């Protein structure tokens, strides 16, 4: 805990009820099964580009998002399938986007790295490390400008902590008291480079000290702990216009992306983390508290598998993106419709 | 330049008193802020200091700190915050103190502002303006003298305005603020004091319409921003020799009014293109390519370009002048295309 203002005192008050806990468990399994299946489909060549999986990070993602209101805007990185699913995006539309189909969340224009579901206030996945964090602060700026009571959350990884733009916007967020939560999902590696080889101070949440901003570290493998920490951070932002930083310590089981052979990490390291698998440990909690029975837990897994199966079938059957879509979303009003606009650009670009 | 006549195409429809290019921009922001509560101004020293070039003079007093936001020196950060605010539906007008500092925000502009509408399948808009004073001529040397029109107009998803007169500065900025796409608004530091007529609150200049600044049948001179005045000065000199140059100002590079430029070149059969940026892969190079594609069969001579020298801007006054396009260079190119004089 870096500071006395640290968001921890009221953790107990934020404990979710049984229904929310069951929902969190369901979402974690949906993400796990979705990601496993996405990996298979990538190997089959049905998903292109880069594919970054969140297996191992489910507690951090679900714990954080479940602590916000559904109308609180969030931004994420290119490892964001879980964020979309946690926000309630239709797994079919998410898988169809990965397949590059017209029925995808972004009509096939974004792909795995650029999911967005504006209706659910999920403001997107972005491909430049650190580049999306200012957008979340901008969303918080708009909330403050309109005097609304929402909270924006920037979700990013340990790699982004060393991008200068994070320091720039953390400074402005504190200076202007914007309602934003900086959520660092520290999965131990920026691609192949371990945190201790990239950050002089490995307690990443201490970056907040430089801006007189409260911050704390939580166990990112413990969904309840993450939920509690982000609940308090959201309360601070909502009620006191106090931004804060939460660092969730987690681990990604797979390589950086599907094209990463993942040869630099020790097998024993993975085993050590997998022994604390967030889905297994959370199930133990739920069983112990009588929130679910063993049969119900099995049913959750079966339901997740079925949802993913349906998502793949939907994506497969979905039409390709019509070529007329190539430039349709470039501008609000494509000026090629303008009689005095430019000549046709080969490939149908902007018609500039 | 200072002896050049006011652009022929624009008569003052309302303003009896000429105002400066600087004040025209201030008027545009003030009127749009009065009209739409979602419009706000943000940037380094735009509030209390009233802007490095005093373009935001009076706005803090009138609209308060909520809508006129002084930022730290964090270009990438506050441009990104502007983009996020725009995605939420506000209409930020971001002032980069100068175009030179926008290079620090290039990732935000190119990867986010230009892309969010497209890559998310049209779910969000990014209705923002980023104003950037630029250009050379005040001995500010290598790092403070950029003209980055070519960089920004290269990027699909951005719109790019390059006003040359007070009327256009006001009318284009008002259009840019009301536009639902990100507009890079490139102002010329050398024009801030230039005076001329301006339009009223609803006299907007649409993005994507070129303006003919001087009529002539012998050669088309296409010039942007401050170079319009260099071209008009050259045209004035040429008129004394019986050569009538037609000076056209594209006013925006995205959208580009190629048809207006091509129509003039088809009529005159010759074109000289003048810009303050570098020659390689520049705006003039691109416009030349577009005009070759559009009117090759009408050309009586190769298209000529007059640009800045292909060097970082030197400090020494005489070298700086040598590095920038001059009226005599423009006139020389026109004469050369017409086979007159020794060039």
Image (cartoon, coloured by chain):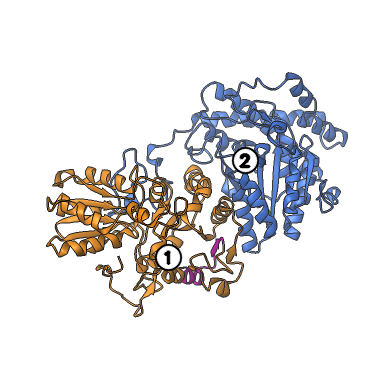
Specify the segment rendered in magenta. Answer: B29-44
Say which of A199 and A75 sits in front. A199
Magenta span includes A298: no
Say which of B221 and A303 sits in front. B221
Mark 1, Cα crowd under 10 Å, few <14 / some 14-19 / many 20+, is: many
Chain B, hue in figure: orange
Chain A, hue in figure: blue
Left or right, residue A228 beside residue A164? right
* Labelled disc at residue B174: 1
> Measured from the top left, where is residue B269 in percent x and y?
15, 50
Say which of B164 and B130 sits in front. B164
Say which of B335 and B58 sits in front. B335
Q: Is residue A14 above or below residue A295?
A: below
Q: Is residue A15 above or below residue B223?
A: above
> Measured from the top left, where is residue A297 in percent x and y?
77, 30
Contact (Cβ within 8 Å) of mark 1 with mark 2: no
Residue at which label 2 appears: A84
The image quadrant where one finds the N terminus of chain B is bottom left
Left or right, residue B11 beside residue A161? left
Q: Does label 2 lie on the same chain as label 1?
A: no
Please tell me in which quadrant of the rendered image residue B47 appears: bottom right
Magenta span includes B36: yes
């Amino acid at each position: 805990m870096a500071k006395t203002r640290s968001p921890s005192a009221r953790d107990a008050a934020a404990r979710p009820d049984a229904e929310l806990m069951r929902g969190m468990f369901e979402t974690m399994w949906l993400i796990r099964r979705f990601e496993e299946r996405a990996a298979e489909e990538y190997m089959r060549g049905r998903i292109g580009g880069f594919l970054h999986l969140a297996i191992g990070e489910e507690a951090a993602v679900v714990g954080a998002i479940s602590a916000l209101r559904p109308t609180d805007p969030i931004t994420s990185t290119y490892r964001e399938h879980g964020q979309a699913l946690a926000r309630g995006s239709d797994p079919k539309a998410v898988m169809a986007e990965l397949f590059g189909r017209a029925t995808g969340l972004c009509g096939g224009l974004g792909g795995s790295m650029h999911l967005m579901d504006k209706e659910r206030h999920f403001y997107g996945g972005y491909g430049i490390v650190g580049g999306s964090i200012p957008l979340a602060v901008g969303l918080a700026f708009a909330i403050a400008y309109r005097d609304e009571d929402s909270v924006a959350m920037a979700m990013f990884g340990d790699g982004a902590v060393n991008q200068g733009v994070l320091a720039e916007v953390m400074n402005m967020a504190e200076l202007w008291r914007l309602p934003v939560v900086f959520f660092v999902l520290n999965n131990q590696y920026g691609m192949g480079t371990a945190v201790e080889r990239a950050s002089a101070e490995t307690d990443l949440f201490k970056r907040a000290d430089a801006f007189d901003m409260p911050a704390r570290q939580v166990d990112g493998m413990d969904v309840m702990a993450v939920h509690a920490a982000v609940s308090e951070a959201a309360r601070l932002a909502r009620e006191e216009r106090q931004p804060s930083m939460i660092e969730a310590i987690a681990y990604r089981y797979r390589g950086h992306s599907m094209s990463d052979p993942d040869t630099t990490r020790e097998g024993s390291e993975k085993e050590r983390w997998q022994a604390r698998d967030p889905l297994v440990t959370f199930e133990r909690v739920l069983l112990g508290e009588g929130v679910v029975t063993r049969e119900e837990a099995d049913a959750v897994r079966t339901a997740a598998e079925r949802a993913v199966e349906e998502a793949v079938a939907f994506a497969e059957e979905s039409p390709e993106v019509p070529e007329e879509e190539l430039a349709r979303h470039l501008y609000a009003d494509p000026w090629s419709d303008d009689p005095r606009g430019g000549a046709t650009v080969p490939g149908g670009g902007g018609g500039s | 330049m200072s002896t050049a006549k006011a652009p022929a195409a624009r008569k003052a429809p309302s303003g009896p008193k000429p105002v400066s290019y600087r004040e025209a921009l201030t008027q545009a922001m003030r009127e749009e802020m009065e009209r739409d509560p979602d419009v706000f101004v943000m940037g380094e020293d735009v509030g209390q200091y009233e802007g490095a070039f005093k373009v935001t003079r009076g706005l803090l007093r009138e609209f308060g700190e909520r809508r006129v936001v002084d930022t730290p020196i964090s270009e990438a950060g506050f441009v990104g915050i502007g983009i996020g605010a725009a995605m939420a539906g506000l209409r930020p007008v971001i002032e980069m103190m100068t175009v030179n500092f926008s290079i620090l925000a290039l990732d935000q502009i190119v990867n986010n502002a230009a892309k969010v509408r497209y890559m998310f399948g049209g779910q969000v808009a990014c209705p923002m303006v980023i104003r950037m004073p630029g250009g050379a001529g005040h001995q500010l040397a290598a790092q403070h003298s950029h003209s980055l029109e070519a960089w920004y107009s290269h990027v699909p998803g951005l719109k790019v305005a390059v006003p040359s007169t007070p009327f256009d500065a006001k009318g284009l900025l008002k259009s840019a603020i009301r536009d639902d796409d990100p507009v890079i608004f490139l102002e010329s530091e050398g024009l801030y004091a230039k005076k001329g007529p301006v339009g009223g609150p609803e006299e907007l200049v649409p993005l994507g319409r070129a303006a003919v600044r001087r009529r002539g049948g012998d050669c088309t001179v296409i010039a942007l921003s401050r170079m319009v005045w260099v071209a008009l000065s050259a045209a004035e000199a040429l008129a004394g020799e019986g050569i009538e140059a037609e000076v056209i100002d594209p006013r925006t590079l995205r959208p580009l009014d190629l048809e207006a430029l091509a129509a003039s070149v088809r009529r005159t059969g010759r074109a000289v293109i003048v810009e303050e940026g570098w020659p390689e892969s520049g705006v003039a190079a691109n416009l030349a390519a577009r005009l070759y594609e559009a009117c090759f069969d009408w050309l009586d001579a190769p298209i000529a370009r007059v640009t800045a020298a292909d060097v970082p801007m030197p400090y020494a006054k005489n070298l700086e002048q040598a590095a920038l396009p001059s009226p005599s260079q423009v006139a020389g190119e026109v004469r050369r295309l017409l086979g007159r004089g020794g060039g």
